[in-house]
Amino acid sequence: MAEKERWRDALAYQMINIFGPTFKARLMDKLPLYQEAAFCKGVQCYVSSVKELRRSQREFDDGMTDWLASFQAGEVFYDIGANVGMFSLTAAKIHNQQVKVYAFEPSFSTFASLIKNIAANGFGEVVFPFSFALGARGGIHSFNYTDLTPGASVHTLDSAVNQTGQTFAPAFSQKVIAYSLDELIEEHNFEAPTHVKIDVDGGEKEIVEGMKRLLAGSAVKSVMIEVTETQADDARVRELFDIFKSAGFVETKRIQHAGFKTYPFVYDILFTKDWKYPHE
């Protein structure tokens, strides 16, 4: 954080704490905490932290917007690592609530904001939020938080190792229920997705391992997945590609994140199967 931001935050903290807890609670109740999102015109975002503010101000790459816009009425979208709902809200908005969205976000603080955003935009009949984790197999797991602030990211399931292979001391470790996608569909009657987005800051391979049977079928047309490549010929990335290839998927588009000039590189990679990307 820049020095100017530190001073600004410290000043705001001091000003707020001049008042007693009752006044502060009433102020929070009355404040207009929603603002229009930059990523999708007409979508309102709940903002209670700097992290949420920055997410509301983000804009999608044209390639990502084109992919979301390519969905068809009646299709099903899985948003895995939904955070405050950027992808979920956009899909619901641009398709006039004609695409069903399943939004998966295990962080307790961020999940609350996701619910607020769904409710504020009137998407409760089309965006279905779930607060459990996803992985290679079901059961009780440890969910490790890097930060408890709403809108935070880079949390991990089981090991406290981030997407670049660095260990971290969790701000909190919570026991959570996790499922594999194959379990959800085969044992709990979830609708199979047509399109899937995965952005979980390091646990992508485990989630994909848990959806091998789903990928082998014909339901899924496309998967957009964020991948962190820590070195040339990264073994985890290679294994991830092998899973998609063996299920008949091909890489259709790659969007490199700005600001990464040396390893680690971060990409959004679109895999498709028997489906033509509209701007291919």
Image: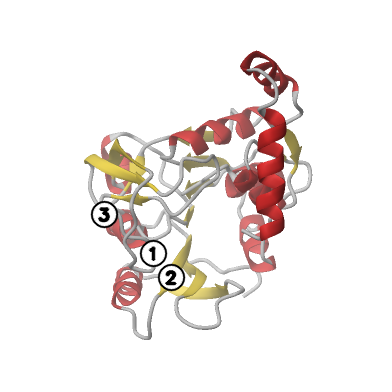
- First in sequence, mark 3 or 2: give its number: 3
Q: Earlier in the sequence, mark 2 or mark 1?
A: 1
At 45% across and 76% down in the image, what residue appears? 264
Q: Position of residue 39 (x, y in %)?
A: 71, 52
* Disc 3: which residue: 159
Quadrant of the image for the N terminus? Answer: bottom right
Q: Residue at x 38, y 69 (%)?
A: 164
Quarter of the image holding residue 33?
top right
Image position of 215 (left or right of 280): left
Q: Residue tagged by mark 2?
A: 228
In the picture, the quarter occupied by the C terminus is bottom right
Q: Is residue 46 visible?
A: no
Q: Residue at x 47, y 64 (%)?
A: 226
| Residue 28 position in % (x across, y down) | 68, 23
Quarter occupied by residue 263: bottom left
Horizontal side of residue 28 vs 112, given as left or right: right
Q: How many marks?
A: 3
Q: Amino acid at mark 2?
A: Thr
- Name the residue carrying label 1: 163
- Residue 249 in picture, x, y percent from top left: 40, 70
Q: Amino acid at mark 1?
A: Gln
Q: Does the CB distance between marks 2 and 1 fall below 8 Å?
A: yes
- Residue 74: percent from the left, percent from the top? 57, 43
- Per the image, label 1 sits on a secondary structure element best described as loop
Q: Give the distance between the C-alpha atoms of the residues marked 3 and 1, in whole angstroms.
A: 11 Å
Q: CA distance from mark 3 to mark 2?
A: 17 Å
Q: Quadrant of residue 46?
A: top right
Q: Tell me how far mark 2 sits from mark 1, CA to CA.
A: 6 Å
CB under 8 Å between callouts 3 and 2?
Answer: no
**Horizontal arrangement in the rendering, residue 29 relative to residue 161 (left or right):** right
Q: Amino acid at mark 3?
A: Ser
